[in-house]
Amino acid sequence: MKIVFVASESVPFSKTGGLADVVGALPKALASLGHEVEVFLPRYRITKPGAVIPGAESLTIPLSGGYKFASIQAAGEANGVRTYLMECPEFFDRDALYMANGKDYPDNAERFAAFSMAALEFIKRSSKPPAVIHCHDWQSALVPVYLRSLYADDPFYEKTSVLFTIHNIGYQGLFPPEIMPLVSINKSLFKVEGLEYYGKINFLKGGIVFSDFVSTVSQKYAEEIQTDEFGHGLEGVLRSRADHLLGILNGVDYEDWNPATDKLIPANYTPEDMKGKEACKRALLEKMGAHSPILDRPVIGIVSRFVKQKGFDLIAQVADELMREELYVVALGTGEPEYEELFVSLAEKYPEKFLVRVAYDNTLAHQIEAGADMFLMPSRYEPCGLNQIYSMKYGTVPVVRATGGLDDTVQPFDGEKGTGFRFRQYSPVALLACLQRAIATFRDKEAWSKLQQNCMQEDFSWTQSARKYANLYQNLYEAKTRGKAPGAIAFY
């Protein structure tokens, strides 16, 4: 089948979070199964020039506010996947992808409406319609909205289905209704059954309502987002589409995340020969400024966006008691000012134990995965999470809150079986008790070695998940070509 991914970011072209890792890896896994896969992305200022093949195809985007002009650049073919970039300097030649100074760009609705329209216009230039357009998060959620409205009578898309994947329901694309004419959304769609959401326009809701099928990135998260606690106001909409909602766990690309081959870490190592991990630990502590590193202390790693979702308010409440332990915390990330300030203040208060870098640094992220003993993810909610999976491959034991994909991927260690430590109640007491269990286990070198081996033997490669997506695409295609509603056949 021909599958076209439409997404706002993907490695190696652009990245702010796990979405980019998924869009960079899943198409490769699908292509290896024999599918024809294309990826359509914006070209941002951060997109490396070398990633683009010289030459471009012009494109006119018909939005109600007038016409926008863009060019489509081929970014080459790798691992059987062709990538195309929409270049529109007016919208995407900016320092960051979505925001500046902690605030969303005020024209984000127009930016990603133009991107969604450009995707549909560009796809039409092919002689072969795609079987499925696979859209991701609110930035591409207008693709199914446009298909069911502006392109409803276009014969080119007659047999094309849309799969919409929610990577994080906390980010929805909310805008005032006044933007509707600017982004070519008919006012008739401003209703509860359409895009209306408490007096605003909700792009993510449009993706959920107008797509043929909805997926999310773990089985547990698919259940959670249908509840009041985790649905962020869209739980009712999702419950109404429960027969068309599926959780498929994200995989990881072990070509990029493997301690045996990782070129970004000081020393490589394998489950059979772990000597390199101690070298990575020493190098990490020295790089982060620890004087005379004490290697028999556990190192707790954090690589994250510094935002409310990630549970860092719990760390603030337990930090003083945690710092009484003989350990190090090594943290890397950027995000909301209050959490950046929290980490900086903790580093100033405990300069020999709490080591922080406020930055985006992919090399250092790899080095933390390799050099840490534990990896902490105390999230309020976590759709899937990738770092706990990366950590296991590196023999770095995850300590997580049992929510979403963290609950699906990390099994409690009982002395023999299991891959990490979990706590359920979102409270500082539960977090501290979980960390103390992990630290106590670290002191038992035999048990810790067994736990590391369990972690490193886990396999979360994309192969299995890609097959589930391929089966879903096939069922969507068959339903569309037979003229049936998608719910008329079994999907999973």
Image: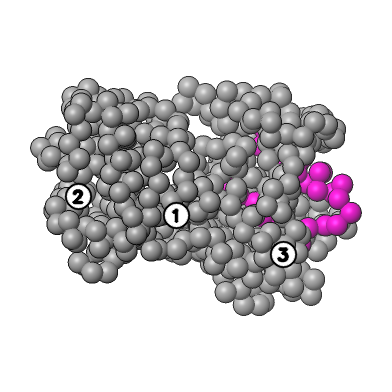
Residue shown at 32% from the left, 46% from the top: 277
Q: Are marks 2 and 1 in contact (CB under 8 Å)?
A: no
Q: CA distance from mark 3 to mark 1?
A: 26 Å
Q: CA distance from mark 2 to mark 3?
A: 45 Å
The answer to which of marks 3 and 1 sits earlier in the sequence is 3
Q: How is the image coloured?
A: one colour
Q: Which residue is mark 2?
A: 435
| Residue 468 % position (x, y) | 58, 68
Which mark lies nearer to you, 3 or 1? 3
Q: Secondary structure at mark 2?
A: helix
Q: Secondary structure at mark 1?
A: loop
> Badge 2: how crowded within 10 Å, few (<14), some, or many (20+)?
many
Residue shown at 72% from the left, 62% from the top: 35
In front of the other: 264 or 357: 264
Q: In this view, which residue lies farthest toward the bottom?
A: 489
Q: Are marks 2 and 3 in contact (CB under 8 Å)?
A: no
Q: Which residue is mark 3?
A: 34
